[in-house]
Image: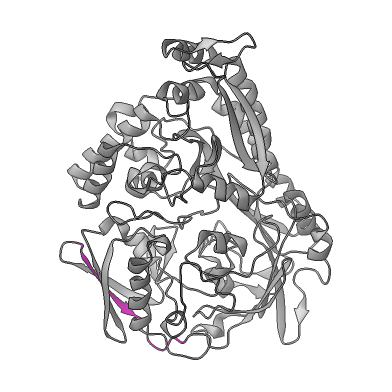
Amino acid sequence: MPTPAHGRSPAKFPRRGRTVRAAALLMAAGLLAAGCSGAGGGQVAAGGSVLTVAPNPTGPFARAFNPFLPTSTSATGFADNLIYEPLMMVDYNSDTYKPWLATAYKWSNGGRVLTLTLRTGVKWSDGQPFSASDVAYTYGLLRKYPVLNNGGLPVTSATAPNPATAVIHFSGPAYTDLDNALGLKPVPEHIWGKVTDPATYQDSSPVGTGPYLLSTFSPQTLTFTKNPKYWQANGIRVTTLRYQAFDSPSSEEAAMETGQIDWEDHVFTDFSKLTSRPHISGQNTSNGVTFILPNENRYPLNLLPVREAISEAIDRTALSTAEGSGQHAATSPTGFMSPQTRFIAPAYTSMRYGGAEPAKARATLENAGFTMGGNGVFRTPKGTPLQLTMLLGSGQENLITLAQVMRQELAAAGIGMNIQTETFSAVTTDVRSGNFDLNIYGDNGNFDPYNYYLYLFDPAFYSPPGKLAQGDLSRYQDPAAEKLFKELETLPPSSAQASSVTASLEKVMVDRMPVIPLNTTATQWAFRTDTFTGWPTTADPYAFAEPLDDNVELVMLHLRPR
């Protein structure tokens, strides 16, 4: 994969609400019966209890736990979070960091050096001691293998002057990369150092510092048992976790209702109906924005008037209602939603989306040289029909419904749109390799402008068709925008200069439309209260309790079987 010009690549799925709602998986027929057989959730096992998790309807699992590879982490329902731990854990309530494998950090040399103080007494699950050498080695992997550098860190070197101190050197100020730097999950040097190619390593028998060990594997079920060498082992009361694969959102919901699973990542439209049932509770948060992702390597989506016409033709409120799941229509073309609206530059504070404007969309296309065809679909200046294809996950019924409504809205503006569905793995590959027209894509949910826009359209991450992209999935190219991102990296986040550069990036978003804001991204999770206690509540929101998030470890430290 080409290395970005300034050595960065964005987070695989950024840490806040990292599920991407733009795709869901379809499991092969017959797996539901296999996946749901046996005892239900909350089963008491010999010497402890079993908690059954449905990470989302991802289809069959793959035995691949490499924490750096998006295809591996998604193929295991992000169960790598049970095995590999971050240096620091995010506290989503205060947007601060909890000391974890690292107990403290310090910047020096103008943000070019990060010194980490590491926790002592931690062991890998095979009994070997964890130390700063492992951290330095892991940072070295990011430098040597850019495809692993999902945190986008411009690492030049990393050393371990003593077992409890790691010193990381960056090529320039890295203040804006702190979240990714502290979110790094170290891997054991004594194992990974023997791996021929870490970029393709499947890590089928992972060794980590986290609370659980992989016990058994099948495409339908992953079983994890308590790691007795975990540094907080006394706090873990759930001795066994079972990750269960499901073939569709409806089958997962049925299993939740009948008590076959205890905790699920919810991707259904009627969340309130599920949580109104006895012994089922949950939370619903809007922590990001969903976008229409246009492939700007493809004609005519590389023409700005086409992207403008798409935005003008749609009714975001109607689409949000069609999708359900508690979504809210995007209001600002900057893409910022509350509480990010505080970042909106004065020039855009009064700019708001209205409803569908098909006449305006048609005028935009006509002014750009498009002509109406006899079938009610415009023809491009090259004479080809303005016929686009929306690529979605085959199990994502709510987005498919949304796309069907969108298709009608675009048709009123003279834009044709087909809907194509594939499995999650196929969608992921096609979008990252540029083999698509349109996709509905969930953002990273970061609450600072730099990281919010970085993954969406920093041209430094541009990859040509056929090459897997880590970011800039719309293939937006603009040297001026890339320069703005590089400048923002060097500035203190609260400075007037940073605000000025952020306003310039907002201008790119509004004027050039590298992506098209659609609605909020709802992250929902449900859990059974009759089998386990200690779940996060409104009164005590100690963790972001989505099963796919790093915070899963915090939840496991609080849960107690009834």
Q: Position of residue 447 (x, y in %)?
A: 39, 49
Q: Is residue 454 above or below residue 500?
A: below
| Residue in the picture at 51% in, 54% down | 18
Q: Find out whether residue 119 is within the magenta segment.
A: yes
The answer to which image quadrant residue 61 occupies is bottom right
Quadrant in the rendering for residue 340: top left
Quadrant showing the N terminus: bottom left
Q: State left or right for residue 442 relative to residue 400.
A: left
Residue 117 among those drawn in magenta: yes
Image color mode: one colour
Residue drawn at point x = 48 percent, y = 18 percent: 382
Q: Position of residue 277 (x, y in %)?
A: 77, 52
Give the left or right position of residue 452, taking residue 489 as reference.
right
Q: How many marks?
A: 0
Q: Is residue 205 above or below residue 359?
A: below
Q: What percent of the width, then of the height, locates residue 448?
A: 35, 48
Give me the residue at 80% from left, 60% from top: 31
Residues in magenta, as a range: 111-123
Q: Is residue 545 visible?
A: no
Quarter of the image holding residue 152?
A: bottom left
Instruction: Return the x and y of residue 57 as percentages of the image width and height.
Output: 69, 55
**Relative to 385, residue 393 above or below:** below
What is the residue that sits farthest to the left in this orientation?
109
Q: Quadrant of the C terminus?
A: bottom right
- Asked if one can make out residue 454 in the rendered structure from this viewpoint, the answer is yes
Left or right, residue 134 beside residue 75: left
Residue located at (74% from left, 72% from top) = 42
